[in-house]
Image (cartoon, rainbow, N blue to C red):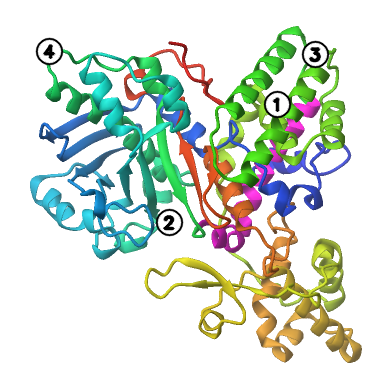
Amino acid sequence: MTTPAVIQTSLKGKNALPLRPASQVMDLERLGALHQSRLSFMRTTVRHIMRERWQIEPSRFELDADGYGTVVYEVQAPHGLFSFVLFSDYLSPEERNDRVIATQWDLTMALVEGQVDDIYLQKLRENVPKQEAGRVDARVFVLSRANRSARNFDYVVDQLAKGEQPATDKIAKVGYLYRTTAVYGSGKLGMADWEKVRTKHKDFARPFAGEMFVCLMLRNFSLLQVEHIAHHKSPDNFQPMAAEIKRFFGIGNSTGLGMAPYMVNHPLLLNQWIEMRELALARVRVLGRINDSIRQQLNALITRCAQYTRDTYTEDQWQTANNEQLLKDLAALHTQTSASVTSWDELLNWSEENCSLECQELLVSVLLELYPDLVDDLEDYQNAEEFLDLDPVMPLQQLKDVIETRYSWALSTDFDKDGALETCWYRSEEKMEPRLGSIADKEARQKQMALGVGYAVRKCYNQLCEYMGDNGTHNTARFMVARPKMRGIVRRIQSMNRCVYGDIQANLLDRNVLPMHLLRCKLAFFGVGKFDPRSRLWVRNTMFQGAPLLEDIGQPFNDDWFMPLAPKQ
């Protein structure tokens, strides 16, 4: 979706809102410090469901006493009827594998257009459990799978069967009953592509809305299933789970390198996400009135963020150190805000001088939380058409000026230093999934993906300067004829010059590049929390923790599940 005129106006001219510069915002390490916010896709998905009062009811519930079988929910949204289809199958411990190479799972799911009859359900039954090995048609537009939490699932069933509630301190360590290992959409495996979803299914015409909805439905089913199994296990002693404890359960997720190339290959979409977040912050800085009530909310949110951080468990030393530093910074921030805060600019500047990037960006999320009236309408402008257009008549001097201005970060990078070009991003032949290797690996080099934007810009600039030595008055078309291999990067340079953000300002080919920053950035826009890196290449996290339940639809909703804390027992 194109940025509306009212927002474009706010970005330009004398009275422009004070957006942070791209050199600051698009730094890779800062992107890797982003947190969930009001504009994250989980929050916006839930807001739509609650505001529009979607009707979500099971039309088929065929589970045996052990929770295996088939469940179909009918989803009546404002603009259409959909079905969420779920298959629960027995999975032996030796077959359970959370890696992408797995071929069997506890649950497999599909979000489908319209109602599902017996014939179509059988077709789904034959293919959805196979995931990548199966094939579906364009009625399906999201496909996913999940495995039970080894630490929580049986424990919760046993507690409910005994008539007792699960301990919230145990849930805090692993805040989910299931963990999904992939959520597919956008035309993969025969599904409807994004263009069809965007134009035909208005209810899911926001970035990753369908994928987020499937994870929300998985979370709802996980709560229903443990109660179903516990009731059959001990019908006389069984007690249902308390609603406040249910809300504290989310859905686990394991995310690997698959997300990293997306951030580079969709620069216009990334620009739109970043721009809306930065515009929301700019609105708060200029229009956000500060009074005693706001100060009280601010300190309460900072206190909540500190407790949430203390409740985040990880064995990763790097993340542990980050969390420990964040807690120190939050304590200092709380001391700072306990005095009379009169200017958001002053507080933001103080954080930049005294706090880690984690704390600086968490403060941004907290400020957005204080002013829903200034922020929430921007959720409707997170789409962008990913089309990079070549301007053949642009004079070469103008193209050179664009590179020197917008890509100064790439020109200042030393690509000749040891290890600067060592990392090789490629796709595996078996799963067609992104992998990280060394440029010394010939096989990996042959399958290399073009993620080194900075290096490509540098090569283009060198060739452009050489060409302009004798042809300084030529336009871009003439340069393209002489240097056809530069067409792709020139198209990107020209297109991105119309954006405020979009290009990640880092050398992604460097030996020491940390892919975790790319994963964290995209996951923050999804709205996840409880980051738990398992290596520099993949991370566990939690989705929808604290979100309302399906049975809450139609009830008063204040959208206050930012950094949720364990309910008291």
Cα distance between the residues tagged 4 and 3:
52 Å
Cα distance between the residues tagged 3 and 2:
49 Å
Q: Residue at x 74, y 13 (%)?
A: 295
Secondary structure under tag 1 reads helix
Residue 560: within the magenta? Answer: no
Vertical order, 172 against 492 (above or below): above
Residue 260: within the magenta? Answer: yes
Q: Nearer the viewer, residue 360 or 44?
A: 360
Residue type at mark 3 is Ser
Vertical order, 493 against 219 (above or below): below
Vertical order, 36 against 427 (above or below): above
Image coordinates for residue 148, horizontal then vertical, percent: 30, 40
The numbered mark at residue 236 is: 4
Image coordinates for residue 416, horizontal then vertical, percent: 81, 78
**In the rendered structure, are the residues bearing label 1 and label 3 in contact, judged by CB atoms less than 8 Å apart?**
no
Quarter of the view holding residue 49? top left
Range of magenta residues: 259-286
Disc 1: CA contacts within 10 A as few (<14), some (14-19) or many (>=20):
many
**In the rendered structure, are the residues bearing label 1 and label 4 in contact, judged by CB atoms less than 8 Å apart?**
no
Residue type at mark 4 is Asp
Disc 2 target residue: 195
Secondary structure under tag 2 reads helix
The numbered mark at residue 367 is: 1
Q: In the rendered structure, which disc, 4 or 3, sits on the residue that comes first in sequence?
A: 4
Quarter of the view holding residue 402? bottom right
**In the rendered structure, are the residues bearing label 2 and label 1 in contact, judged by CB atoms less than 8 Å apart?**
no
Cα distance between the residues tagged 2 and 4:
52 Å
